[in-house]
Image (tube, rainbow, N blue to C red):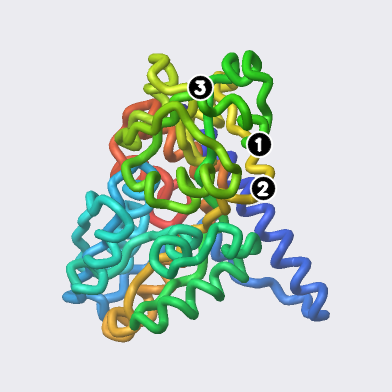
Amino acid sequence: MPIRKLKYLLLVAVFALSLGLAACGDDDGDDSTSGDSSGGGDLIQSNPDNSGVSLTIGSKNFTEQIVLGEIYAQGLEAAGYDVSTDLNLGSETIALQALKKDEISGYPEYVSTALTSFYGKDADQVPADPDEAFDAVSQEVEADGLVALPPTPFSSANAVGLLTAEAAELGVETISDLEGKSQDLALYGSPECRQRIDCLIGLEENYGLEFKSFTPVDIGLRYEVLDKGQADLSIVFTTDAQLGASDEYTILEDDQGVLPAGNVVFMTKQQTIDEAGPDYAETIEKVQSGLTVEVMQELDARVDIDKQQPAQVASDYLKEAGYIE
């Protein structure tokens, strides 16, 4: 996919955010111009005070997480920090333990995952409003001595995906439409899906569905198993590149709200924030501010479809957004 597409999407994101800022200014009766924090020339300045401050940025081991980890790491490096990465941490439980043990300085996590996997919330207890969800996560992680930085613009959710042709053949548009049909269908999902309320457990308990089989699969193969006919249904993400690039796949509407949306928060420690200085959190919030759903789909597509390296994709994004030269 051409770089100009990403540039266009970023300009749209910047324009939308600018309108929001202008509206806020009008409400306050203030005609002054706010600083642009969403790209478009907002170059990250290298601060000599950050030299010698070592940070390790982590992520879980799938495309979107690795791209995010690279974006944060390269942004912080541009701010003058000494940055290393650990972008193959596995599940969220492993990532959280790595953070608690100071093996990493921070990593990106989905608010829905944090609330359901770490703090025992049911999927329907995860607020749909990103600000409310962020407040809920912030309160929970504080008790663990952690900090969740403000969320990304984009929200990613688990979704039940299938081939569009099969959806038409089955006559299904919502997850509830699978009632009476799911027992003949093979479902594939990530290994941790079996234990998650916003995955297999939620489909079984909240929708009352039974499947012919559930098979754990590497997250990178979630569309391949559909293409090869191994899976009738596959757990996918709403920000997946394949969904924006083709009409070959369909996601079923989560009509009972079992699979909550999830904005990303950067999980870290207050001690790290204090020791790293103000550029740490400010840089993280800056580089993620242009990440709309469309931009994230495009970045994911460059890795999953165009087979580009995540580090290069992250670098191109940061340059297109005006964060680095």
Name the element at disc 2. Answer: loop
Cβ atoms under marks 2 and 3 closer than 8 Å: no
Judge whether residue 42 can be spotted in this image: no
Q: Quadrant of residue 17?
A: bottom right
Residue 28 locus on image (x, y percent)? 79, 80
Q: In the picture shown, does residue 204 fall above or below 87?
A: above
Cβ atoms under marks 2 and 1 closer than 8 Å: yes
Name the element at disc 1. Answer: helix
Compare marks 2 and 1 and give the one earlier in the sequence.
1
Q: For the point 78% across and 67% down, which residue is it?
A: 23
Within-10-Å neighbours for mark 1: few <14, some 14–19, many 20+: some
Q: Which mark is residue 256?
A: 2
Q: For the point 62% across and 27% down, which residue is it?
A: 180
Compare marks 1 and 3 and give the one earlier in the sequence.
1
Amino acid under label 1? Ser
Kindly report the distance in space between the C-alpha atoms of the residues bearing marks 2 and 3.
Answer: 22 Å
Within-10-Å neighbours for mark 2: few <14, some 14–19, many 20+: few
Amino acid under label 3? Asp
Q: For the point 68% across and 29% down, which residue is it?
A: 173
Q: Which residue corresponds to mark 3? A: 184
Residue 321 locus on image (x, y percent)? 49, 51
In this view of the protein, which residue sits in the foreground, 281 or 29? Answer: 281
Q: For the point 32% across and 35% down, which residue is it?
A: 216
Compare marks 2 and 3 and give the one earlier in the sequence.
3
Q: Which residue corresponds to mark 1? A: 176
Residue 176 locus on image (x, y percent)? 66, 36
Q: In screen coordinates, is 290 left or right of 171?
A: left
